[in-house]
Amino acid sequence: MKKKHLPLFLLLCLTLGGCASSPVQSASSSVSTESAFSTAESASSSLSSETSESSSESTAETISISEESSLTSWSESISESSSQSSTAADGTYHFYCINDFHGCIVEQYSDKGYEPGIAKLFGYLKEQKNKDPEHTIILSAGDMYQGSVESNSNFGSLVTEAMNDAGFDAMAIGNHEFDYGQQYIPQFAELADFPILGGNVMKYDNGPTDELWNPDVLAPSTILERGGNKIGIVGMIGAGQTSSITSEFVKDITFPEPSKLALAEAEKLRKEGCSLVIYVLHDTYRNCVDYAADKAYFDGVFTGHTHSLEKKFVNGVPFLQSYSNGTALSHFVITLKDGASTCTTYENISASKYWDEDESIAAIRDSYILDPDFVAHTSAYCGHINGTLQKKTGVPALGAEAIYHAYQKDVECAMTNEGRSTLSGDVYYRDIYKAMPFTNAIVIAKVRGADIIHEMEYNPCYAPGIDTFDPEGWYIIAIIDYLLFHQNTSKKYDYFTSLNEGEGGEVISRSQHYPFDIVSEYIRVNLEGYVNAADYN
């Protein structure tokens, strides 16, 4: 390991204080542009890959998978071959990728489905690689760290160390890698034994530039030499995803449309002798299929960001994304023979409770999360939820109410954005944290009523005593920094436009209190440990 992680007590003060393989059914089939994904084995299971977009962030709809069911994988026999390479050695390569892991360290069931935890999921990948390390490549399509107290408390070090142990070969940067502040990106790269790729993370200096932000930290690509071949990996992030990051963390960064950069990088890798080139993009296939479905450039594409199921085969190129939180992973197989490449299998593999925990990865996990101070803090009981607080309605409604009561002497209303998971039954600090995992500080500001009215289309606003907001009126609001300071790709405030220069808005004060702490205390103290979900959904 390249760097010893910070003492857990210090990290808690910084972050928390605020104040056997999966069962696979295979079948041969003719290939269409969109291959069918079979239903889960259990008739009671329901899967949804529909993606909704709010003003806060694009997230996937809830999926429900019963304990005994699993996503069914299909293997396709494919006849198309890619560009020729006279120097390629014959061989069959297995490529695995996970996307949007979001720090799901512990094994559990959630509204996302079965989350196997890091020791089982990474252990499965490690096992596959150990079978044939010369022909097995493990990749990530980004958003690995942000999302749980187990990961955030150490700023992603736990996840990175486990990725090192499992043998990851490369990772594309995701928008949530910036959530701790861009100063942590070099720390991720220093600790990682694999390259972190971001070929379209560019400097912004009074406008977009064509200069890479930090090429020593985020390279556009990497070359692996395996099985007698050079294998190129190109990594990019989706265009404009700075708008999915707290704006203050990306003031000098922009993410331009990656198509030309990705194709140029692939062409460069081919000229450098790469027999295979794989594209890893933190974005949906819909935003790359028009240019990436060309085997002269890419032999396969892994995607992410939308937490959805993507399983496409276009012009001989597989495109795969597998939900989020480790509930599934992506896998395709490419065979090189006589200088030509052929994709012979592409599939989404559901996580299985029957996978074994890897001992060394479990030891890394336990060195962080079994610390007595950490256990005491995260296992603190908050209260009981009667019913289910839905992540898009009930969680932010309770959050806005809690924030208002924390600052009621100074404000007229309060607002936060949607949650990341539901809450029900007995809840502990770690559960509140997972539902509201972002370190978004509370800001008090004077804003125009029209801005509040617009944002109320997407996020609940708690405003006792105000029946209707006057669009031309001015109000004092307590709100998370992500929403208040949200900017478009031109660095203009687009949620609360009254903050733009000359519009009259004003930032009054800032705190370093976070929603997960405020809500935990509100349930425990103000609500005396009892929440009726029907009052908020």
Image (tube, rainbow, N blue to C red):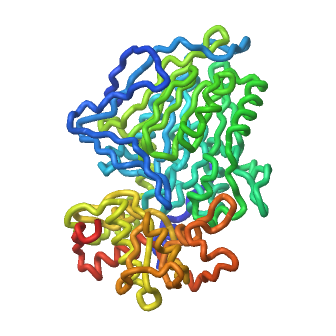
Residue 166 in the image: x percent, y percent? 50, 39
Q: Picture coordinates of residue 96 (x, y %)?
A: 50, 32
Residue 120 visible in image: no
Q: Residue at x 77, y 59 (%)?
A: 207
Residue 384 higher or lower than 25, as above or below = below
Q: Measuring 47% from the left and 81% from the top, which residue is drawn there? A: 470
Position in image of residue 455 (x %, y %): 48, 68
The quadrant in which residue 292 appears is top right
Q: Check the image and name the residue furthest to the top.
A: 338
The answer to which image quadrant residue 377 occupies is: bottom left
Split into 4 quadrants, where in the image is the C terminus?
Answer: bottom left
| Above/below status of 361 relative to 496 | above
247 lies left or right of 413: right
Q: With respect to residue 341, does 370 lie above or below? A: below
- Using the image as rendered, state which of residue 409 and residue 342 is in the foreground: 409
- Res. 516 visible in picture: yes
Horizontally, residue 371 falls left or right of residue 66, namely right
Q: Residue at x 43, y 24 (%)?
A: 35
Outermost residue, bottom side:
409
